[in-house]
Structure formats: C-alpha cells, structure tokens
C-alpha cells in the first residue's frame, strides 16, 4: 500500500479532549483513496468519534479485510495497532485479538464485498457471538478495486460504467444484523 506521511500541525488553540489530545492526534496517513468514494468521510467520522469518546489511540486495535476498505485503518489513529486480514476473514482475526486482550477497543472496517460476499459467514458469527467490536461496513454497492462490478448490496437497476444493469436483489447488512441480534445497528 502506498503511504504518504501527513504533516502534523500543532496549535496552542486546538480543542483538546479529556485526555489532552487534539483531533490531529487521532489522524493517520494521508488518504490515497479516490476522491468522492465516501470512504474518507467514514474515516473522518471514526476520528471524530474516538476523539469525542476520549479513547486513547494506543488502546485501539484496527482490523480490516481486503479491498478499498482495507486502507481505511491506515488513515486514523496512527498510534494504534492494526491488521489487514485475508478476504472476508476480518471478524475471525478480530475475535482472536479480542480474546487475547479484552481491554482494547476493537474497530473492524470491511467493505460490502468483503463482508457480504466471501465474509458473510464470518459477519454472521461475529454478531451471533456478540463480539465486542465496532464493525463498520463501507457499503457503496461496488467492487472499486476491480473496477466497478456490483457488490452483493447493489440496488436492483443500478447501472455499471459500461451500461450493465444489476438484476439481483441486494443483501441488506442492517436487516441481517438485527435479525441475528446485534446490540446496536446504524
């Protein structure tokens, strides 16, 4: 993965959380994702949330699968530990990390292809076991790295770059999570 070091900007007037840390203390590397894909907005929301919740970056673990979403953990909390797992297996790796140290705040980031195709069983069992983690699905309905095929969550009638139309009923990850008893779904 390409890695661009983000410049650190310090200011005396920066807002600090209860830990005395600024928003920039929760940032990671500079994003190399395509402009407008939405994944950087998710990264920004994660940074804002862990800053507001006063979670020390060194007490976080970041897990991901494969695809564009696998880059996201590099873009926040550069003082934390992370792991990119194989396709669809992020929940199993997160389960192992959580079992090894239950004191760490576990954030799993996965794409709709990673979770809803090859990783559907892993996703389901993580919910069934009530794994203590934040599981973020970056759901944009497309396999971005392989240039635009529909993912399992693409809406019926969606049109690809080359004009093909999706005829398959989409998988709804929120509906699945609620059905399996997830404690919080948004």
Image (cartoon, grey):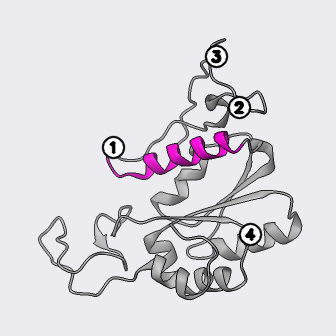
Seen from the viewer's position, the closer of residues 38 and 16 is 16
Magenta region: 36-53
Question: Can you tell which mark lies on residue 10?
Answer: 3
Judged by depth in the image, the label closer to the viewer, 2 or 1, is 2
User: Mark 2 highlights which residue?
Assistant: 17
Q: In 3D space, how far apart are the residues under numbered discs 2 and 3 (Cα atoms)?
A: 15 Å
- Neighbourhood count class around disc 3 (C-alpha, 10 Å): few under 14, some 14–19, many 20 upward: few
Q: Main secondary structure of the magenta part?
A: helix
Q: In 3D space, how far apart are the residues under numbered discs 4 and 3 (Cα atoms)?
A: 34 Å
Q: Position of residue 53 (x, y in %)?
A: 69, 45
Where residue 183 sits, quadrant-wise, is bottom right
User: Mark 1 highlights which residue?
Assistant: 35
Label 3: state its secondary structure: loop
- Neighbourhood count class around disc 1 (C-alpha, 10 Å): few under 14, some 14–19, many 20 upward: few
User: Mark 4 highlights which residue?
Assistant: 132
Q: Is residue 27 above or below residue 132?
A: above
Question: Can you tell which mark lies on residue 172?
Answer: none
Sequence-first tag of 4 and 3 = 3
Q: In 3D space, how far apart are the residues under numbered discs 3 and 1 (Cα atoms)?
A: 26 Å
């Amino acid at each position: 993965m390409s890695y661009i070091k983000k410049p650190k900007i310090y200011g005396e007037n920066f807002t600090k959380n209860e830990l005395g840390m600024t928003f920039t203390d929760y940032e990671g590397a500079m994003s190399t994702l395509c402009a407008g894909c939405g994944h950087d907005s998710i990264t920004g929301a994660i940074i804002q949330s862990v800053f507001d919740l006063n979670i020390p970056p060194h007490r976080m673990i970041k897990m991901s699968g494969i695809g564009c979403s696998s880059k996201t953990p590099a873009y926040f909390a550069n003082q934390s530990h992370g792991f990119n797992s194989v396709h669809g297996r992020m929940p199993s790796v997160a389960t192992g990390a959580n079992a090894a140290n239950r004191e760490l705040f576990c954030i799993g980031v996965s794409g709709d292809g990673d979770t809803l195709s090859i990783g559907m069983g892993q996703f389901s069992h993580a919910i069934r076991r009530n794994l203590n983690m934040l599981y973020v699905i970056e759901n944009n309905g497309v396999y971005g790295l392989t240039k635009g095929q529909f993912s399992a969550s693409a809406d019926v009638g969606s049109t690809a770059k080359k004009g093909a139309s999706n005829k398959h009923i989409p998988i709804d990850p929120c509906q699945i999570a609620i059905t399996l008893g997830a404690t919080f779904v948004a």
